[in-house]
């Protein structure tokens, strides 16, 4: 809830009334019952000027403001922010009887409790996507991270929130916490807010939150094309030649990652690849994420890896351990210790963070490597997209991470091929 003071006629010289503007997703203009001469009003700070003549008035306004805040908090606890109307708030400030129409069950469901139900319903297929399809596990995973972040937000606020507390103010407070207290990157913050919004929509659909609730997400959501790594051909060769494994699983991780660098496969596809999918020099895949059928030509480096596991691929670690093992391997390879500057937006400000390249290795780096290297070598974009399964050129371009000098070299090679230099 936000409360500001203003006067009716600031440009007219003389006595004028003082009002409170009270906003909580809705708005109430409340006449305080006090007045002031316009010459005693600070038009920049929207308050009486701080002088001895105004001391009594300032004290009364402070008490009036506290009265409004107490009335609002009492209503919020009893019927929830979303159900507070301007009339109800005015009556509460004036201490008139409040008629409660909100069912009791709507007042007692914790947001965290319902969020877990939202996750469980999605996993069970009770809640489906907008086109009525079962939502995949990879898409559900960020829901749990969002729930954890909201629990930390509650700890920070020192308060548990119920579904009836869902309001514009709560959303803005949560966004401020994610941006300025946790210091999350813009993309991560936006993901959490979007998943929180899906939970709110589900609660509205199940009539646990008033469908008339109007939440404005403008300015809180966004996306940036983050600086992500890809591997060069030389770095891939260094990975292939590395054999000092302390754990046999590390070798499997290295092999699958290198194969993915040369095929563009996602983790969800290469982690369950079978020899039956490999024939006639191609890999035949029904992509887990998009359900698109793709035919991928097998690069000689990938073929050597597949031949190594001709009796069947060993079990692949789950994604997070896979990424951890990949970093353990990468930090032992000198060419992956080169510095990498990553621009990222935190708290509304662009920051530059310094890493070594191995620190940013993850399973998806392989797919990005494939798209970038093929693009740099002149493979037509639509050919790469047909093999990678990309449907949208804009999305595909996010995968191409060549730098300015590399793009300049591509252009020079094109000129040479055309005989212009």
Image (cartoon, rainbow, N blue to C red):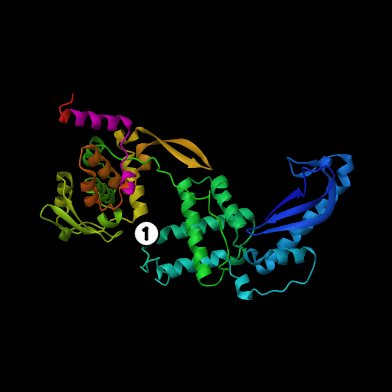
Q: Residue furthest front?
A: 12
Circle 1 Cα neighbour tier, 10 Å, few/some/many (<14 / 14–19 / ≥20): few
Q: Residue at x 75, y 49 (%)?
A: 5
Give the left or right position of residue 45, taking residue 369 as reference.
right
Tell me which segment is drawn in magenta: 394-415
Q: Main secondary structure of the magenta part?
A: helix
Q: Is residue 176 above or below residue 293?
A: above
303 and 92: which one is in front?
Answer: 92
Give the left or right position of residue 234, taking residue 394 as reference.
left
Residue 219 position, x and y percent, is: 53, 48
Quarter of the picture holding the N terminus: bottom right
* Residue 227 in view (yes/no): yes
226 and 211: which one is in front?
Answer: 211
Q: Is residue 315 above or below residue 363?
A: below
8 and 179: which one is in front?
Answer: 8
Residue 340 position, x and y percent, is: 38, 34
Give the left or right position of residue 301, taking residue 344 as reference.
left
Question: Which residue does the numbered mark 1 point to in the structure image?
Answer: 138
Residue 304 position, x and y percent, is: 15, 47
Q: Quadrant of residue 358?
A: top left
* Residue 239 in view (yes/no): no
Report if residue 412 lies within the magenta region: yes
Report if residue 160 lies within the magenta region: no
């Amino acid at each position: 809830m936000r409360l500001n003071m203003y006067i009716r006629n600031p440009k007219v010289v003389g006595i004028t009334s003082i009002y409170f503007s009270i906003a909580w997703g809705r708005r109430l203009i409340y006449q305080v019952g006090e007045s002031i001469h316009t010459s005693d009003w600070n038009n920049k700070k929207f308050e009486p000027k701080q002088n001895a003549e105004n001391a009594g008035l300032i004290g009364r306004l402070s008490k009036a403001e506290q009265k409004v805040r107490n009335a609002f908090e009492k209503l919020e606890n009893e019927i929830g922010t979303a159900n507070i109307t301007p009339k109800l708030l005015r009556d509460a400030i004036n201490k008139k009887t409040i008629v409660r129409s909100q069912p009791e069950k709507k007042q007692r469901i914790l947001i965290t409790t319902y969020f877990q139900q939202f996750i469980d319903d999605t996993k069970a297929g009770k809640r489906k996507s907008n086109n009525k399809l079962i939502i995949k596990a990879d898409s559900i995973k960020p829901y749990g991270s969002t729930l954890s972040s909201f629990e930390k937000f509650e700890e920070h606020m020192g308060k548990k929130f119920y579904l009836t507390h869902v309001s514009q103010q709560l959303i803005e407070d949560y966004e401020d916490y994610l941006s300025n207290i946790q210091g999350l990157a813009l993309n991560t913050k936006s993901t959490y807010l979007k998943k929180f919004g899906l939970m709110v929509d589900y609660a509205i659909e199940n009539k646990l939150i008033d469908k008339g609730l109007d939440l404005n997400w403008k300015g809180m959501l966004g996306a940036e094309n983050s600086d992500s790594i890809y591997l060069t051909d030389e770095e891939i060769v260094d990975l292939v030649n590395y054999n000092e494994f302390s754990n046999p699983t590390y070798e499997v991780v290295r092999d699958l990652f290198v194969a993915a660098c040369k095929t563009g496969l996602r983790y969800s596809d290469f982690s369950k690849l079978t020899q039956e999918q490999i024939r006639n020099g191609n890999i035949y895949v029904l992509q887990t994420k998009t359900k698109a059928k793709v035919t991928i030509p097998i690069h000689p480096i990938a073929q050597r890896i597949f031949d190594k596991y001709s009796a069947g691929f060993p079990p692949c670690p789950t994604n997070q351990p896979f990424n951890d093992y990949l970093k353990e391997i990468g930090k032992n390879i000198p060419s992956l210790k080169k510095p990498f500057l990553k621009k990222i937006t935190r708290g509304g400000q662009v920051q530059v963070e310094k890493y070594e390249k191995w620190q940013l290795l993850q399973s998806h780096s392989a797919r990005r490597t494939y798209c970038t290297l093929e693009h740099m070598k002149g493979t037509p974009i639509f050919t790469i997209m047909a093999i990678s399964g990309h449907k949208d050129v804009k999305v595909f371009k996010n995968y191409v991470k060549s730098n300015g000098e590399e793009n300049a070299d591509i252009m020079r090679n094109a000129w040479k091929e055309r005989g212009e230099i």
